[in-house]
């Protein structure tokens, strides 16, 4: 299958400051992708370049077989066949919902325009709100209208710029799931930018981690979480701690947590120095054995409790456990590793079995 969107060596700068050094990735037809990264990493710049709002200094952007952006050629935004959902919704306050959605359908016959408005309102489950105005809707409803307006012209590609950032956590998660279902139902490819990891994991088929003007890793949410290519990517897609260690045998590594043995082979030869990345959920506590530590604090999170543990070395780490809050501050505990196979980084070859 040929790519719907192909970006190769994209470089963008504002005045003398380079924002994107060399960004490359592909999006397949019907695929939902996300650019994930901290504020200021260039996510929105990529989106603006795809939309045609800015011209690149180098590199190419192709939509299907058509070259739509390069240093010498930029197809105007209105000729790209793309829809866009903005962070602030960008609805016209003086127009009702039907007219907001119909705004981009000016060249369409009136009867077809009305039918298209009805269809997209049904799609986003707001069929009875066509005569209301934006200020009469909740934030979640406004976001659905913004999505309906972007989908009404039947775009080849949908661009979303942090579309759920103004919503509360529960509504953001709900809308992320709903938007994914809507796009999959229509077979529309999309690319979204966000700094919210959970949001990216919920909606995306593929995720690109953007940092230092480059895509550090591009892959499925599962591959980024379980097979990060660097400590920086590992830390960005989930909290965790790096421990220096040395591989002693196929399933064991010596660290400041002691000799850790795992159920599965590490994939690194004995004698290799490694960095071992462990997430809070990879650890558990008991009063029976383990690495000595002291509880610094305990944060009750309902079905989970997040503990801060001060090791005998003075280092503080986090341990996430299911169940009731069992350990109090200053209580002496033992730290154990529960992971079947840890995430390792090493200058030695790492044979991944995932």
Image: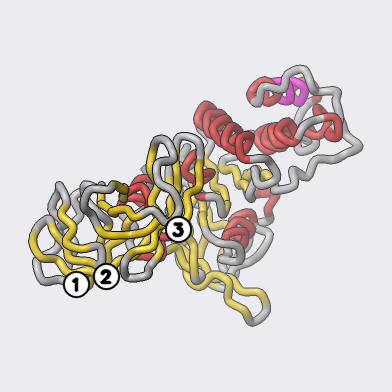
Q: Residue 243: image x %, image y %?
A: 30, 66
162 left or right, relative to 215: right
Reading the chain from its start, which is encountered first: label 2 or label 3?
Answer: 2
The residue pinned by badge 3 equals 296
Near-viewer residue (140 or 18) = 140
- Residue 237 shows up from this direction: no
Residue 241 within the magenta-colored segment of the rendering: no
Mark 2 surroundings: few (<14), some (14-19) or many (≥20) residues within 10 A: some
Where 42 sits versus 105, above or below?
Answer: below
Magenta-colored span: 113-118
Report the Cα–Cα distance between label 2 and label 1: 8 Å
* Mark 1 or 3, nearer chain start: 1
Tag 1's secondary structure? strand
Q: Residue at x 68, y 59 (%)?
A: 53
Residue that protrudes farthest toward the top in the picture: 128
Which image quarter: residue 330? bottom left
Picture coordinates of residue 95 (x, y %)?
88, 34
Mark 2 sits on what residue? 244
Residue plotted at (44% across, 40% down)? 325
Label 3 SS: strand
Q: Are marks 2 and 1 in contact (CB under 8 Å)?
A: yes
Q: Secondary structure at mark 2?
A: strand
Q: Which residue position holds label 1?
A: 273
Occupied quadrant, residue 14: bottom right
Could you say where residue 139 lies in the image, as x and y percent from the top left? 74, 36
C-alpha distance separating marks 2 and 3:
23 Å
Judging depth in this view, the residue of 273 and 257 nearest the camera is 257
Distance between mark 1 and mark 3 Cα atoms? 30 Å
Residue at 67% x, 36% y is 147
Q: Nearer the viewer, mark 2 or mark 3?
A: 3
């Amino acid at each position: 299958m040929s790519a719907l969107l192909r970006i190769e060596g994209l470089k963008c700068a504002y005045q003398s400051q380079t924002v994107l050094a060399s960004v490359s990735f592909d999006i397949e037809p019907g695929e939902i992708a996300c650019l994930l990264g901290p504020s200021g990493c260039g996510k929105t710049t990529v989106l603006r370049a795809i939309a045609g709002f800015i011209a690149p200094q180098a590199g190419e952007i192709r939509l299907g077989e058509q070259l739509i952006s390069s240093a010498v050629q930029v197809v105007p935004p209105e000729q790209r066949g793309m829809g866009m959902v903005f962070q602030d919704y960008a609805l016209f306050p003086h127009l009702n919902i039907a007219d907001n959605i119909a705004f981009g359908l000016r060249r369409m016959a009136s009867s077809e325009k009305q039918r298209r408005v009805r269809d997209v309102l049904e799609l986003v489950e707001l069929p009875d709100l066509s005569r209301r105005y934006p200020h009469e809707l909740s934030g979640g409803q406004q976001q659905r209208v913004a999505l309906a307006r972007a989908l009404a012209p039947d775009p080849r590609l949908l661009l979303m710029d942090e579309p759920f950032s103004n919503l509360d956590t529960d509504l953001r998660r709900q809308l992320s799931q709903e938007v994914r279902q809507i796009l999959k139902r229509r077979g529309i490819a999309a690319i979204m930018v966000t700094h919210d990891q959970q949001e990216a994991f919920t909606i995306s088929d593929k995720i690109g981690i953007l940092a230092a003007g480059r895509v550090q890793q591009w892959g499925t949410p599962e591959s980024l979480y379980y097979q990060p290519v660097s400590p920086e990517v590992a830390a960005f897609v989930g909290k965790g701690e790096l421990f220096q260690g040395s591989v002693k045998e196929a399933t064991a590594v010596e660290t400041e947590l002691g000799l850790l043995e795992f159920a599965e082979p590490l994939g690194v030869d004995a004698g290799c120095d490694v960095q071992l990345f462990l997430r809070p959920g990879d650890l558990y506590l008991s009063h029976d054995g383990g690495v000595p530590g002291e509880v610094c604090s305990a944060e009750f999170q309902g079905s989970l409790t997040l503990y801060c543990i001060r090791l005998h070395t003075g280092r503080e780490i986090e341990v996430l456990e299911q169940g009731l809050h069992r350990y109090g501050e200053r209580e002496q505990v033992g730290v154990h590793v529960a992971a079947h196979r840890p995430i390792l980084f090493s200058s030695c070859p790492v044979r991944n079995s995932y």
